[in-house]
C-alpha cells in the first residue's frame, strides 16, 4: 500500500519540487495550495497525466477549520496519512519600525501558526497508527536572524522550537519530527532581490552558488524515508555552508 503525504504550499518552488519527487517515489501526494490555484492545477494535471496518484486540496494553513477539512479529505480518499511536509510560508522584508502589526501577524499566522495547525490536525491519525513523519521547513534565518526580516526570522525560529518540542512529545508514539533550514534557494521568494544583491549574497556562500528547490526536496524525502527512522528533533541545514 502506497504511503500518503501532504505537502503544504505545494503549488510552486520547494513545495512543487517536493510534490513531484514524492509522486515519482510512488507516494499518494496531496498538493495543498491557498491562492495559487492555477499553478497547483497545472502541477496536479501534469502529474496525473503521467500516472501518479495526486490530489489538490485548497486550505489556508492559518485557518484551523480549513486544515482540519484537508486532513479529513486526505484520510477519506487514501485511508491513511503517513507524512506531513509543512512548507507553506510567506516572507516580508522591511525595517522593524516600518513593519505593521498586520504584517507581523500575517507572517506568524502562516509560518508558525500554520505549522501548528497542520501538526495538530495530523497527530490523532499518526498516533493511532503509532507511526508518522513530520518535516517542517524553517530557514537559516530562523537560526541566525536576518536584518530587516525580524518577523520572518522570528516565525522560522519558532518553527525550530516547535519542531524540537513536538519531537519529544511524539517520540513515544513512533512519530519523528524534524526541520530543514534552507539557505539561499532559487525560488520566487527571492525574486525581489536584484542581480547585484544576489551576486553579493552568493559570494558569501562557501559552495559559491544558490541551492535548488530539488536539493531541498531531496533532503525532505530523506527525512521522510525509513533511512531517517532514528532521526528526530533535528534541524538539517541545507545552505551551502553559509551557516555552520
Image (spheres, rainbow, N blue to C red):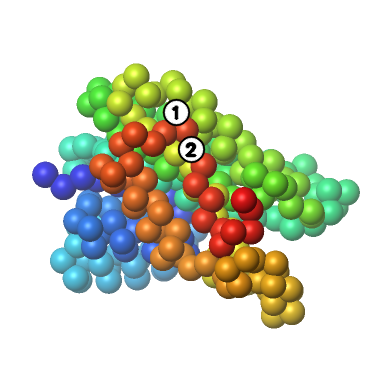
Q: Residue 239 is drawn in which quadrant?
A: bottom right
Task: Report x, y in % for residue 173.
Answer: 31, 22
Is residue 208 visible to the viewer in this orientation of the structure? yes
**Point 39% across, 24% down: residue:** 170
Residue at 74 percent across and 52 percent down: it is 146
Tags 2 and 1 touching, CB below 8 Å: yes
Task: Give the CA distance from mark 2 to mark 1.
Answer: 9 Å
- Of residue 42 and residue 178, the one placed in the foreground of this image is 178
Using the rendered image of the protein, determine whether residue 10 is visible from the camera's viewpoint.
no
Under circle 2, the secondary element is loop
Q: Quadrant of residue 128?
A: top left
Instruction: Tell me what residue is drawn at x 70 percent, y 46 percent.
Output: 144
Q: Earlier in the sequence, mark 2 or mark 1?
A: 1
Which of the two discs, 2 and 1, sits closer to the camera?
A: 2
Q: 23 left or right of 64?
A: left
Q: How many marks?
A: 2
Q: Tell me residue 165's x, y (percent).
A: 52, 26
Of the pair 104 and 163, the residue shown nearer to us: 163
Q: Residue at x 66, y 71 (%)?
A: 202
The residue labelled by disc 1 is: 167
> Around disc 1, counting alpha carbons within 10 Å, would you say few (fewer than 14), some (14 to 19), or many (20 or more)?
many
Q: Residue 234, labelled with which disc?
A: 2
x and y percent of residue 241 in the render? 59, 59
Q: Give SS at disc 1.
A: helix
Quadrant location, the N terminus:
top left
Image quadrant of residue 176? Answer: top left
Amino acid at each position: 500500500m502506497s504511503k500518503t503525504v501532504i505537502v503544504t504550499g505545494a503549488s510552486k518552488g520547494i513545495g512543487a519540487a517536493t510534490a513531484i519527487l514524492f509522486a515519482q517515489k510512488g507516494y499518494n501526494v496531496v498538493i495543498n495550495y491557498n491562492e495559487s490555484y492555477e499553478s497547483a492545477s497545472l502541477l496536479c494535471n501534469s502529474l496525473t497525466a503521467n500516472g501518479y496518484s495526486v490530489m489538490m486540496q485548497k486550505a489556508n494553513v492559518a485557518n484551523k477549520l480549513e486544515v482540519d477539512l484537508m486532513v479529513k479529505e486526505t484520510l477519506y480518499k487514501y485511508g491513511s496519512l503517513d507524512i506531513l511536509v509543512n512548507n507553506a510560508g510567506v516572507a516580508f522584508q522591511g525595517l522593524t519600525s516600518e513593519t505593521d502589526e498586520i504584517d507581523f501577524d500575517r507572517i506568524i499566522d502562516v509560518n508558525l501558526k500554520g505549522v501548528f495547525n497542520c501538526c495538530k490536525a495530523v497527530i490523532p491519525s499518526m498516533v493511532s497508527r503509532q507511526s508518522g513523519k513530520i518535516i517542517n521547513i524553517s530557514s537559516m534565518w530562523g537560526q541566525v536572524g536576518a536584518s530587516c526580516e525580524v518577523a520572518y526570522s522570528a516565525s522560522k525560529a519558532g518553527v525550530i522550537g516547535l519542531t524540537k518540542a513536538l519531537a519529544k512529545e511524539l517520540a513515544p508514539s513512533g512519530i519523528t519530527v524534524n526541520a530543514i533550514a534552507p539557505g539561499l534557494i532559487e525560488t520566487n521568494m527571492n525574486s525581489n532581490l536584484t542581480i547585484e544583491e544576489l551576486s553579493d549574497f552568493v559570494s558569501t556562500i562557501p559552495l559559491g552558488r544558490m541551492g535548488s528547490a530539488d536539493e531541498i526536496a531531496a533532503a525532505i524525502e530523506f527525512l521522510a524515508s525509513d533511512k531517517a527512522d532514528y532521526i528526530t528533533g533535528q534541524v538539517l541545514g541545507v545552505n551551502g555552508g553559509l551557516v555552520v
